[in-house]
Image (cartoon, helix red, strand yellow):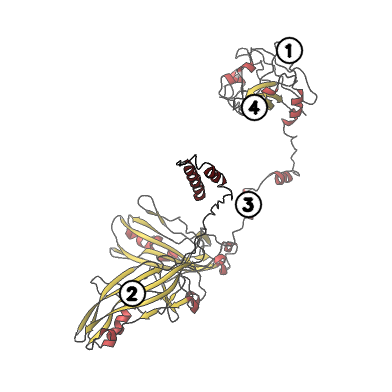
Amino acid sequence: MFTSQLALLHVFFLMVPEGVRPQPSPSPSGAVSTQSDLGPRTQGETLQSSSEVPGVSTVSPTVVTPSAPGNRTVDLFPVLPICVCDLTPGACDMNCCCDRDCYLLHPRTVFSFCLPGSVRSSSWVCVDNSLIFRSNSPFPSRVFMDSNGIKQFCVHVNNSKLTYFQKLQKVNATSFQALATEFGGESFTSTFQTQSPPPFYRAGDPILTYFPKWSVIGLLRQPAGVGAGGLCAESNPAGFLESKSTTCARFFKNLADSCTLDPTLNAASYHNFTVLKVPRGLSDLQNTKFQVPVTPVSQADSPLLAGNTCQNVVSQVIYEIETNGTFGIQKVSIGFGQTNLTVEPGTSFQQHFIIHFRAFQQSTAASLTGFRSGNPGYIAEKPLLALTGDRRHSMTLLQSKGDGTCSIKRHEVQFGVNAISGCKLRLKRVDCSHLQREIYRTLHGSPRPEHVAIFGNADPAQKGEWTRILSRNCSVSAMHCTSCCVIPVSLEIQILWAYVGLQSNPQAHVSGARFLYHCQPIQDSQQETEVPLTTVVTFVDITQKPEPPRGQPRMDWKLPFDFFFPFKMVFSRGVDSQKGSVSPILILCLLLLGVLNLETK
C-alpha cells in the first residue's frame, strides 16, 4: 500500500512524456489549483501516469470529444459508472457533475460545485512546494494553493481496496436476528415494553392521577390562561414541587344549560380521583397503598340553577399537597371558593387555581418550631423572633386604625429595619395600676416578649439559643408627683447585633435586646383618658471587623560604610581651591534625594 513516506522518497525527478500531463483530480479541502500548474487543456487529450507500482492503482481516465446529444453511445464519464445524483431521467440535474444528460466535458466550468458522490473522491499527500525541486513520482501530482496562499506539492494516492465496503453478508432466517442484534439499536416496540416508571417524582414532573370508576390514568391539571383573552387551557399539567397560582377566564353562550352540565363549574370534578404517591404505582393500580385520596377541606355544594341565577359555581380551587422526599405525595387536600352567576347571554367569569406544596408533618409536635428567619444567621427584613415561655412568635409594633386609634393587629419587627409607629389609646378612668398594666400590654403586645432569638433558626426547646430581653420600666419616684399617675407613653426597642463567622459568608446574630420605656404623668382627676403611644425599634451594628492584613514589605536601603569617602576627599583636598563653591554640596544633596525617592517607591 502506498504511504506518505513512500511518496516523499519518490519525489526526485518528474518524467512525463512530451504533450502528456496528469489528469487533474478533485483538490484537497481548502486548496485550489494554480493556473500555471494546471496548464492548458484540450478536448480529446489523453491522460495517463508514467509508471505503475505493484499493489497501487492509479487514476488513468481517458477523455474523448463529446458528440451530438443524440449520440448516446459515447461514454463521457467512465470514471463514475454509478451516478447517485442523476435523479431526473432525460434531464440535467443541477450540480450533478456525473449526469450524462448534461453533456458537459468539464462540469466544473458550468456548475458552481459538484454534489457529493458526483465526482470520484481522492486522497492527496502534500508537502510545501518549496521543498520539491523535481519529481519522478509515478503517481499523479499537482501543485495546489492552500487557504493561506502557500503552494503545496501533492501526490494523488488511490487504493481501490479502501474505496469499497466489505463483501455483502448473506441474510437468512437464521442470521437475521443475530445481525439485527449486533448492528441495530433499540426499537420503538422494545423500548416501550421494557421501560418502567421512575421510582419517585422529580421536581417539575407531572403528577399522576387515577380514576377508579373508569380505570383511567390521568394528570393533575392546573388550568391556565392562554391568548389575549386569557381563556382557560385545561391541558396545563401541575408540576411536582412547583407551587404556583393561575387565573383564566371562562365564557358561556348559554349559562342556563352549562350551569349543571359543565364539569368545570362543579366542585366534585376536581377531586373525583386519587393521586399516585410515586410513579411506580402505575405498575400496580389495584394496590391502594400507592394512592392518596383528595380530601375536601369543607363541603362544597353542586351547582344549582335557581331562576335566573346559577348558584355554587366554582370560582377558586386550592390544592394543598404534602410531600415527603422520595416517598412521594403523602396527603392532598382541596378547598373551594364558590360564587353565584346571573344567567345572561355571553356570561363570563374568572377562575383561580392555586397549588401549594409543603413538607409532610407526621405529628403536630414537629410543626412547633415554625418558620425560620435565617439558617443560621438572620436575613435582612425577616421577622425578629421572640420567645414567651415555650411559645415562639414575632416581635411586633403598634398599628393604628383608620381613625388613628390602636388596632388589635400589629406590625412585625423586621430584622435590620429601623421603624416607628404610633396610635391613640382611649381608656376610661380606672385606678393607676390598672391603667399602667393596660398601657404596658399595648406597647409590647401580647404575650410580652421575654427572650429574643440569637439566630434566625433558634429552637424554642434550646434555651441557650435565646437571650433575655433587658427591661427598664418607668420610675415613679423620679417624677416627684403625688397626685398624678405615671404611665408609659413610648417603648424603644433597642437591638444590638453583629456579624460572626467568615467574612466571605457572614452570619448576622443578635447580641442583646432592651426595652426602654419613656413615661409621663397624668392627673388622676381625668375621667376618660386618650394617650398617644409610640413604639420605636432601632438596630445597632456592633460588628468588630478583624485587623486588615499587613501591607507589602518595604525596601530597607543600606549604604556602604565608605559611601561618603569620595566626598570627604574632595572636601578635604579642594577646600582652598573650591572655596565659595557650592557644587559639591549640590551634588551630595541630589544623591541623597535620589536615595530617598528609591526608598519611598
Please name the residue that numbered disc 1 is placed on: 17
x, y percentage for residue 368? Answer: 47, 76
Vertical position of residue 263 compared to residue 145: above or below: below
Crowd tier of the residue under label 2, counting other residues whose Cα lies within 10 Å: few below 14, some 14–19, many 20 or above: some
Q: Tag 4: Cα neighbours inside 10 Å, few (<14), some, or many (≥20)?
A: some
Q: Amino acid at mark 2?
A: Glu
Q: Are marks 2 and 1 in contact (CB under 8 Å)?
A: no
Q: Earlier in the sequence, mark 1 or mark 4?
A: 1
Q: Dot 3 surroundings within 10 Å: few (below 14), some, or many (20 or more)?
A: few
Q: Name the side, left or right, on which 50 lies relative to 100.
A: right
- For residue 28, the mark is 4
The label nearer to you, 2 versus 3, is 2
**Front residue of 166 and 536:** 536
Task: Kindly report the distance in space between the C-alpha atoms of the residues bearing marks 2 and 3.
Answer: 70 Å
Which type of secondary structure does the marked residue at label 2 adopt? Answer: strand
Frontmost of labels 3 and 4 is 4
Residue 448 visible in the picture:
no
- The image position of residue 75, as x and y in percent, is 67, 17
Calculate the distance from the C-alpha at mark 2 to the C-alpha at mark 1: 111 Å
Q: From the viewer's side, name the closer residue of 573 and 536.
A: 573
Disc number placed over residue 492 in the picture, else none:
2
Q: Are marks 3 and 4 in contact (CB under 8 Å)?
A: no
